[in-house]
Image (tube, rainbow, N blue to C red):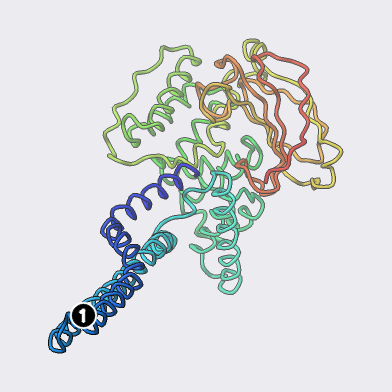
Amino acid sequence: MSYFYLAAATLVVVALVLLLRPWWPVSRRVASANSLPALNAAIHRDRLAELERDHNNGVLSAADLAEAREELQRQLLDDTAAIEVSAVDGFSRRSGIALAIVLPLLAGGLYALLGSPAAVLPEAVQTQRATADMEQLTAKLAQKMEQNPDNPEGWAMLARSYKALGRWDDAERAFGRVGPELNKNAELLAEVAELLVQKNNGFNPRSRELIQQALRLEPDNMLALFLGGGEALDRGRHAEAAALWERLLPQLEPGSEDARMVESSIAMARGRSGGAPSRPAKADVVAGAVMPQDEVHKGVAKAATGAATGAATGQPPASAMASAVSGRVELAAALKGKANPEDVVFIFARAVDGPRMPLAAKRVRAADLPLDFTLDDSQAVMPGANLSSAQQVRIEVRISKSGMATPGKGDLSGKSAAVKPGAKGLRIVIDQVDP
């Protein structure tokens, strides 16, 4: 942010220098003109006195004296014109000063009106503002829906808004008010299933049923295929998971992040099914159709691979446990009054040198603190990015006031030092309040 304002100020200064250059000679002329009137007046008085002396001494005749006086009068008129020029120069100088003041103010005003001042704010502040704006819009939409409840599309929109805010229970209730249209729409069924996966940190009988129902209605629905593959992997049906994701892959933009992620998941599922990793299908069926990034990054991938390394037995394999990081999370005594029992607590691991995407994540309630935790590869958020793949990780804990994993004003947080995967006995104290 400071670099932006420094660059803007530099440009304004350069513009002022270029625009005010014509006024620099004027300023010098004005300084000189300020001393001319007194000097000229003294000169005229001396010359007039000298002429009077010459006339009294008989050196000048009366006619010569009159002619000399007329000459002095003409010079006085010239002096008066010089003073007027100085006045004009003074006006020009004032114009330059006014320009130097008005130009920066006008530039700032136009940027505030037509630009995006919020774009230079810190990311955390932008996130807080965006969340607050969305909360307001969602509240207005909820009020309208109560006044006009016979609107399935409106209830679906409200449910999606609640889901984006992490208000799972409200989103589930809003989806429930869509009515009979819900059971006829594969996309809505898949969205409800996704909501339940996010809410419960995994699949339950209801979400599994909704996924199958969505696939029966629309066999090529993108979200249903993605969730269906995750559900099959969760139950150890690796070949089925790969088959479902192979039906999804042609609908993704070739070479996109989503396509690469699905290709990696297919290869992993094929490998775990006992067969060689299949060659990814060529993604040229639906050009430009991409899986929504927010659906991937809000935890669906975590559910899709939640038991990828040990779905058949329900336990992570020895390799995952060897890289597991464990310890205890506590809330500082000074902050206990700032946390409500129902506040959401996110515990996640990030690579010290790598992307900001968490390598493993766990969600609990503030009422569960203090809490002994373990993070391992079975809690990976994205396929191929897990604890065992990192050199060093940092465990971060956040008590979220908004219920979302993104930082927000008033959140409580704490983090560990950098540790290697497999570290045990960590002690993380939540002792910071986010501004």
Of residues 7 and 254, the one nearer the viewer is 7
Q: Secondary structure at mark 1?
A: helix
Task: Tell me where residue 393 sits by quadrant.
Answer: top right
Which residue type carries mark 1? Leu
- The residue under label 1 is 72
Q: Position of residue 322 (x, y in %)?
A: 66, 11
Of residues 223 and 85, the one nearer the viewer is 85
Task: Tell me where residue 129 sits by quadrant.
Answer: bottom right
Q: Position of residue 418 (x, y in %)?
A: 65, 19
Task: Give the residue furthest to the right.
Answer: 333
Task: Tell me where residue 196 sits by quadrant.
Answer: top right
Left or right: 228, with 418 as reference point:
left
In the displayed structure, 166 sits above or below 149; it is: above
Q: Position of residue 152 (x, y in %)?
A: 51, 63
Of residues 207 and 226, the one nearer the viewer is 226
Crowding around mark 1 (Cα neighbors within 10 Å: few <14, some 14 to 19, many 20+) is some
Task: Give the residue furthest to the front.
Answer: 57
In the displayed structure, 81 sits above or below 202; it is: below
Left or right: 373, with 54 as reference point:
right
Q: Residue at x 64, y 51 (%)?
A: 167
Q: Residue at x 56, y 48 (%)?
A: 127
Of residues 339 and 384, the one nearer the viewer is 339
Q: Position of residue 126 (x, y in %)?
A: 54, 49
How many badges with numbers are in the image? 1
Left or right: 25, with 386 as reference point:
left
